Image: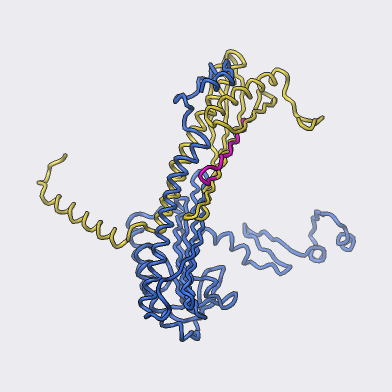
Chain colours: A yellow, B blue
Amino acid sequence: FSPPLAEGNYPSSKLRKLELTANEAFDTYRELYFEGGVSSVYFWDLEVGFAGVVLIKKVGDGSRRMKGAWDSIHVFEVQEKAGRNAHYQLTSTVMLYMVTNKPELGHMNLSGSMTRQAEQDYVVEDPSMHIANIGRMVEEMEIKMRHLLKDVYFGKTKDTVNDLRSIESLAKMRKQQEMQREITAKLQERQPKGRSD
Amino acid sequence: LSGAIKEFGGGVVIISHNREFTDTVTVEKWSVNAGVLVVSGNNYTQKNLEKIVMKEEETKIDAFGNVEKVKSTRKLSRKEIKEKQKRRAAAKKRGEEVLVSKHGQIDSDHFLHPKTNKVFKLDHFRQIASDPEDHTVDEEMEELRKVVEKDVEDYVGDRYAEGVLAVYGAQGVITIAIVHNKYSPSNFWNGRWRSVWTLDTATGEVKGSLKCKVHYYEDGNVQLETSKEVEDKLSKSSSEPHKVISKALVDLVSAAEHKYQEALNESYHDLAETTFNGLRRALPYTRTKLDWNKILTYRIGAELAAK
């Protein structure tokens, strides 16, 4: 803790070793996916098992007059079971913030957040495998959430904007739809009944 | 005892059968009777409770006191959607949807509807308009205002499926306000487009303010908020016939809004391809997911030096 905190919550020494390794592992993860940014992993003991959080923050470089920031918060809990298995629970929140300021655009702020959960059992033959297991879960989760944010959420808001104001003249579009309907009707007339392609 | 309690500065729990006692000591009373909460005392009005219920309903503004409350708790079937659209189109033809803006504000409760030249009283909370009264017209501007209004109606009808507009003319300034709201809470999204344009007829200066807000919140929460200011000048002088000025104005508005929308779409594309990737890649440069077994033996420096 900085500044030092007497009653601070410290992990047990065994857990601390795991925490250090986890920080290194996630540093690598962060470099490979985020190419920059900052990450921290904190572990703490529970009555049974242990828990921790992986925090990642990446701030965009502001190129092309777009400011952005990605924040990941992954909270997980690990319960060791009899035998060689462990049960992992993960709750992840991703917060995204993207602001653009361009002359033809004015000011545009597209931001969002989402939270998802996952649960999984993995084999644990020695404590260091915890890190690999947690790492896999976090990676899967971030990939899924990134995809959802990009394609579903941004896609949906963009569609709504274009719903609010039509880029094409509505009259022109109605005419096109009319034409389509006429053509389809004519085609159906020509095709003898009972034929399928 | 009641005197002592009143003077006491902390919280007190009282269990009592004596109404006189509780009335002296308390200022507000919440009674629960057969599952219904009634609050009394201290000028508390029941109105505040209604607010919580009202939020669930969609209301439509209507110029002459008829309110259509549509509860959208389920997706409308295709047939119902078509019927709803038909009703709205008919309602619009009758001129029943009215735009409320600060440009038409007479005082905190009264607004002007320039098309019919009536001032109506607005119940802000229920969004009902009532008590229409005649309004004195700015004679000088009225001619131009009417022409612009017709052209803007055509424009709005062509670009905004269910847009509502108002054109005000006062003190040498024509103000155009366009609003298009789309609410679909059952599908977890809402959106609104607002544009306000002013033309100073003396100088020909045109100023515009375009605002767009979209909220999508199914299992998540994403919001888009954009705003743009435009400044331009009409190339026609104020001595030209009204029809010419109006056409030039609406052309300018239409071109600017179109350009803005294109810029918006382009930005979406840029954000998705560039900024988003700049924040977090889809996959590392190795084009595969991490091998977590090996990661524990990676030396960060060495791996990245090889990149």
* Residue sitting at x 57%, y 25%: A88
- Say if residue B221 shows up in the picture: no
Quarter of the view holding residue B106: bottom right
* Residue sitting at x 64%, y 20%: A21
Above or below for A176 versus B295: below
Instruction: Residue B81 in the image: state x and y as whole percent.
Output: 36, 58
Instruction: Residue A100 in the image: state x and y as whole percent.
Output: 52, 49
Above or below for B10 versus A127: below
Instruction: Tell me if B56 is positioned left or right of A45 in this view.
Output: left
Point out the stretch of residues depicted in magenta. A53-66
Instruction: Count up the numbered dots.
Output: 0
Question: Which quadrant of the figure contains the C terminus of chain A?
Answer: top left
Check residue A57 for magenta coloring: yes
Question: Which quadrant of the figure contains the N terminus of chain A?
Answer: top right
The residue lying toward the viewer, choosing from B36 and B200, is B200
* Residue sitting at x 45%, y 42%: B272
